[in-house]
Amino acid sequence: MVHGEHDDRTAPFRNRKGRGHKGRSFDRSGRNRHRGGFGVPGPRSRLLDDTDGDVTMSDSSQDSSSQNRFTPYGRPSRKGDARFDRDRRQDKGGRGGLTGGGGGYYRAGLRSQSSWYKVTIPHGKKYEKKWLITALQNICSIQYTPVQYHVDHQRAHFYVEDSAAAQALRRCSHKITDSDGYKVEVHVNPSNPPSSLQSDLKPEHIEHLKQCMAKRFDGSQQALDLNNIRTDPDLVSQNIEVILNRKTNMEAVIKIIEENIPELTCLNLSNNRIHKLDDLADVVTKVPNLKVLNLSQNELKSERELDKMKGLKLVELWLSRNPLCNHFKDQPSYISAVRQRFPRLLKLDGNDLPPPIGFDVETPTAIPPCKGSCFGSDEIKALILRFLQQYYSIYDSGNRQPLLDAYHDGASLSITTPYTTQNPSRSSLGEYYKDSRNLKRVKDSTMRFRLLKHTRLNVVAFINELPKTQHDIASFTVDVNTYTNTLLSFTVSGVFKEVVVDGKSRESTMAFSRVFITVPAGTSGLCIVNDQLFIRMATTEEIRRAFVAPAPTPSSSPVPTLTAPQQEMLAAFSLKSGMNLEWSQKCLLDNEWDFNRAAQIFTQLKAEGKIPDVAFLK
């Protein structure tokens, strides 16, 4: 059981005396469900006497961690999830709810007093809703209508109101193969009706609720105490059931607060069986002055639920006696996780915390637009642009061996890609990931050392093995980090794409950031002593702007033999435009040696700022 994920397991289905196997769980798959990591379906569940390979319909096994989990409303004499103990008590129409004589899992199929079933797709988050629903509809023997499709962590869920459809969907498990070659699992369990279909509180009920909340409101403290609201005598006497883990009920409470006491600063929601905070997220905008929030004695299972409340400027928070509190190895890690969401917090579960360290910015500050390159001086600018033009004309050519002249004998190089939990082999970054020295991924010091490329021979040999590329020089931005008489460090960032080699090509546009640490070489050159390359997928905006300006085609001979009139035209165009011969020739070639049209295009591109500085280096 992965403690950080929402727990969808039902309680063990027990038969009454004389039926089935006493105390024996039909499903022992819960312990291994998440083996294999993200996107990898776990091993097939084993169902008693079931040989057709379908997964089970209940996750009833309980490992040692789940047995020790705090269940504030469970009865000591019962096993299982406290939520289902609650559902049994709320079921007024039958005996025993899901686990009584009317329920249980049978070899013949599913039976439930409720007509609703919850369908769960493990790892369903990675699928598009339209694809998943269509794929299931295509192979399901019975037409069905999915209700309230939603994603919870890595799982996708929806509901169906038909036992026959539930049976048919169960048989669809492992019958669909996704684009990565994995079989799609389908789990089906009896369920209460989806929250979206639960009836709203009637107007007269809301009026009673408003009066009840008024009695619980302390105007002097701007505090509202809704602890255990469902058992309030005023509501119970009117046969009004307010369950705050129901969307409609929580929305009604928030609306009353918004309309009557929007200046509220303290809210107590303890002991209300709240297991997720989606429905409470509106408090961030509708009760902006809230400073103290009590969520203790609820059923919150993951600290990730707190992300939905991050906009609140809380100074005091109570989370004690929630299952999530058991997931931390010690108190400091617990405090750290909570304070990441609420950096101004001064009290947690009644305990004082050290004063927060940070910047108190009351009003949102817009991030300034990205500026162009920063060189420091025209001399350094000319030096770096000349170096980059020479370096990448070789790097993007078919032979990178001449780059040996660019590196120092004792040079070092490292490559890094973003940290990810996904399978990198399926990403366009897969070719780079295996050599990535991302310190979040590589913990072993020996491996960290091995991933560094030492000496110029090893550096260039490694570069030669990387995919062939075409860089968009017009996208480059350069920032000089350090400049002395003996050292020049600068960062160059931009985009590139891989080129066709042996009929194989990647369409993905990638972005890079590269830190060169160089020393002087000769009279006006640079020699690389350290090279740090970071590669990631390009953003949508970077892709849109990539390769807009014309780029010269890498060639060992930038200016091939031309006819006498072409050479004369090239010299004239270079003189008038100010561009070097290589870029001038590119512009003329693109316009079929039409001088006037080339001049018009050049003027337009220059006015739009789409011609890079390197085009004017001579």
Image (cartoon, helix red, strand yellow):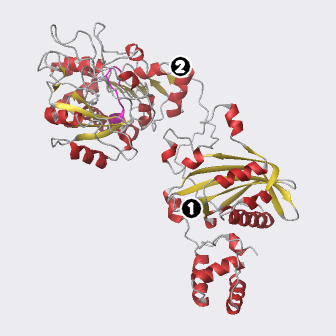
Q: Residue at x 37, y 18 (%)?
A: 297
Instruction: Answer above or below: position of 457 versus 174.
Output: below
Marker disc for residue 501: 1
363 vs 287, left or right, is: right
108 vs 187, left or right, is: left
Instruction: Answer above or below: position of 60 versus 496.
Output: above
Q: Which residues are magenta?
A: 269-279
Q: Residue at x 43, y 19 (%)?
A: 320
Nearer to me, 281 or 396: 396
Residue 565 x/y as whole percent:
68, 93
Nearer to me, 400 or 129: 400
Badge 2 amino acid = Lys
Query: Distance of mark 1 from mark 2, alpha carbons?
Result: 51 Å
Q: Quadrant of the C terminus?
A: bottom right
**300 drawn magenta:** no
* Secondary structure of the residue carrying numbered label 2: loop
* Secondary structure of the residue carrying numbered label 1: loop
Q: Which of pointers 1 and 2 lies earlier in the amino acid sequence? A: 2
